[in-house]
Amino acid sequence: MNFLSPWFLLGAALIVGPIIAHLIRRATRTKVIFSTTRFLSASPPKLDRRNRIQHPWLLLLRCLVVGALAMGFARPYLKQELPAINTATVPQSVVAVLDESASMQRAGLWDAARKKIYDLVDSLGPNDQFALVGVSGSVTHILTHDQWKQTGVGDRAVLVRSVLADRKPGWGPKNLDAAIETASTEWEQMSENVNAVTRKKIVVVSDFTASGQVAGLAGLNWPKGSEVNLETVTPTHAGDAGLQWLGWSESDTGLSLRARVVQSAKSTNTAMSVQLRDAATNEAIGDPQKLTVQAGDTQIVIVPVPTEAAKKPLRLDLSGDDENFDNTLWAVHPAPRDVTLTYYGGHAENDIKHARFYIDHAVAGWKDPIVHVTAGESASSASNAKTGSEFFVVAGPLDAAATETVRKKIAAGDFALVLLNDPKMVDTAAALAGESDWTALQPAQKNAMFGQINFQHPLFSLFSDPHYSDFTHIQFTQPQSVKLPAKTDAVVAAQFDDGSPAVLEVPVEKGRLIVWGSDWSTSVGNWVLSTKFVPWLESLVERAAGGAQRPVIAEVGDAARLMGGEPTQWRPLSAPEGAFQETTPTLPGVYQVKQGDTTHWVALQVPAAASNITPMPIETWEKLGVPLHAQPVTTATPIAAPIGEDQTAPKLEARQKLWRWMLLGAAVLLALESIYSLALARRAEHNTNEAAA
Amino acid sequence: MVAHTFTPAQGLDPQALFAIKDLELRARVVVEGLWSGLHRSPYAGFSVEFTEYRQYAPGDDLRFLDWKLLARSDRSYVKKFEEETNVRCLILVDTSRSMLFGSKGWTKADYARTLAATFAYFLGQQRDVVGLALFDSVVHDYLPPRWKPGHFRHMMAVLDRPPEGRETKLGEALDEVAKLCPKRSVVLVLSDFLAPVPEWDQALARLAAARHDVRCVQILDPAEINLDFGQAAVWEDMEGGRSVYIDPEQARAGYTAKFEAHQTELKAALEKRGIIRQIARTDEPLDFVLLELLQAGHARRAAARRRTQL
């Protein structure tokens, strides 16, 4: 038997106390009260022999109590596990989870992690099964069980080394729960190939920082005999400072970039500086900002960005930190989209009786998209090349050439809005829609309202919330509707209260044509004065511009989600122009993204959580029910288990928990001692009474 | 005079008697039993001094002969009770700490208080005047001898007070009693008389010299007589606070010798003063102690009368 804290055995020396107490004749404490001692002479006291022990059994019990307590505190363990697993006969199914997340980029971690894997593989027997998975955001199978099985016993260690030789840690988040769940499914595949009972083990090699995600392990069903070993690797430098992206700030003084410097609790470098650079050329922009961040503290830095520099991809570098993996932020300022709104109708800008006046005022001040309103009086103006998307508002009849031009634009993907301020406009709308048999329909009532609105339609989905779906106060004094043919692509988004179509949307190849059954003027209704007018127009123009603007800065693991599942091609900043690839990037940096015909810049950052290198407490795993200590799967004869790296004395002691039995024994002995002492006391009392009688 | 013999088994069991908590009731039980015993038992012969009639004995004063009875039944009886009712009696009860010892379940103080109550009740039945004085180092309670309604209850209340438990100073107490009660009386001293004789011998002599009829009842626990008590332990003196390790087996012989020497000295000192001494063991029936006390008093007066006639 060995002891983890042998110095507690010195406590066994307290046994001397009871022994002395039992050797020394206890001075009588009994007092007899007598009327007078005048006639009494003091009796010489009886002395026991020095070597005589009083109540030897009681002394034995007390000594055993002291001894059991001392042994319990000394934390005993047996080198020979009593209920040990016969590793020579029970094969192991081992799945190693190698942490490849961003925090493993720290110096010294990756080599240490690979060494752990190599040592693990070297300790496996010929009948043991092995698989290796890596996790950096997503889980990857580095070495499958089939590869292991197909490789000769002697070549397996070489295979693992060759697989890991050129491998580098990634930049994704530390999704340990997903990796361990994948590893547990590997067990099932392994058990299909092995009939015998196996000892299932998952070995997780990681730096186990608090940024690791393990919440998914709650409720996971662990097979009997399974075990999860946590192998921690430690970095060369204990501290780390990192940059976290906060966002852009626009104020009267200009554009600025906001970032947070996060200092770990064990950092020793407090003096640092940040420098803004051009991401493409690495040229410094402005002067570096010096800052002092204490250990465990955070500080927000605001870096002014010149207007010209904001148009280019940027990087913000942190210097003064030993660990560089999270010292760079990549930044792209989202450029506002330009939309050219071409107004057909020949109305003056300040003519409040027509739609132009209200459209001009509605779009003023929009930051994205930025709308440029122009008058489209002729076909030539419509055909001029303009940047960004185009949006057409047709408030007057078009000639044939203009109609053709606008129709082509719509077919190419632009949007057009036709205002039916006259029955003749129905023909224009039909021509733009490319349909025939549209006839003007005069509504039955002169004063019309919206009778039914399809809030599922994109034109009105903005108002689907009941708080905003009240259109009853909007009236049209000169409504104009369309009688649609039986076969048409037009979709009625809203109807007047007499059931006639009020708002139509017609898909024209890639673009859309919207037909509004009234003019936009205060003389024919109150729609343009409604609070719903501007939001409705903005959502429509935004659709014309390509929809809501997506963020251009995200973490590496969120790159695919950032693109919304649409086909996307990526080009790193350093790659030549046009060298787009469909592979989702896994490295932080600035990428040019191509979706359809449009391209824009996107910055991918190191996950912010990677900078949180606080160690994850072991209690977190225990709370989740992860079997950190193996349960025996067989009652094989005890064999000697060598104390190696994977079976250290504390682990053995923690597994055996012999101290519990020692303390239990001490408690039982104490109970016996109490009973025996009580019996002795009662006997002595009885004798005393008899003597007194 | 009828010869008197009795055994303790015939009297009231002290254990049963002391089970009665009320002191007055305890005294009644003893005295009523004694009276009933007098009417139906041979004890009637010797307790003539307190009966209404007794047979004429040579030397009796013929003035007290009941002539009418003689004429009626041809038997000569004297009526002595008329004379005895005028007895003044003062009962001194030792309430010191040493009296709190008891090995039988009751203490010497209990026994003394009961004996005092019994005697007071008995005398009260005879319409004698009875007083009470409780003492330890001083006389702390004193009721002068008198006969009046409620006096007996008052005495019971005084006797019922828990003793404060000071050390015994018998000599000083007796001197104080002599001052408190200058009129000639029967002084009944109930104490264990374990204090050294020289400490109180002179005071007792002064009390006797003041023509008091002093009678001493030495109340002793059986354990004090033969030391058949206790175990090898530290023994603590109830009064002096002296602690000494005593093994009764070893100390018994020496104790007995010293105790006997004390008793001898005590007896000599009392006899020298002509004082009646009676030993009352706390395991003895109380009524027997009372009877013995009365008998001793009668014998003493008879002897005195004989001495006078001679």
Image (cartoon, rainbow, N blue to C red):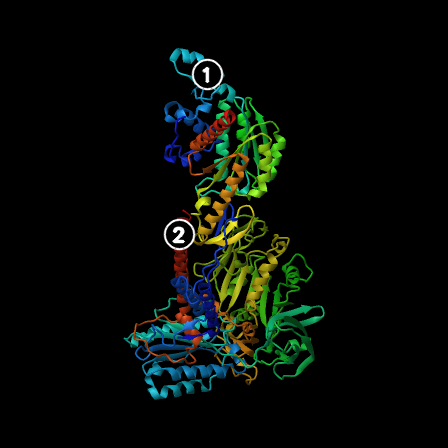
Q: Residues within 10 Å of mark 1 (few under 14, many from 20)?
A: some
Indicate which disc residue A687 carries: 2
Q: CA distance from mark 1 to mark 2?
A: 64 Å
SS state under label 1: loop
- Residue located at (37% from left, 86% from top): A156
User: Residue tagged by mark 1?
Assistant: B65
Q: Position of residue A508 (x, y in %)?
A: 49, 67
- Which of the two marks, 1 or 2, is nearer to us in this view? 1
- Is residue A186 in view? no
Q: Position of residue B243 (x, y in %)?
A: 53, 52
Question: Furthest residue to the front?
Answer: B310
Indicate which disc residue B297 carries: none
SS state under label 2: helix
Q: Nearer the viewer, residue B285 or A356?
A: B285
Quarter holding the N terminus of chain B?
top left
- Residue located at (48% from left, 33% from top): B114
Residue A5 to residue B121: above or below = below
The chain containing the residue under callout 2 comes to A
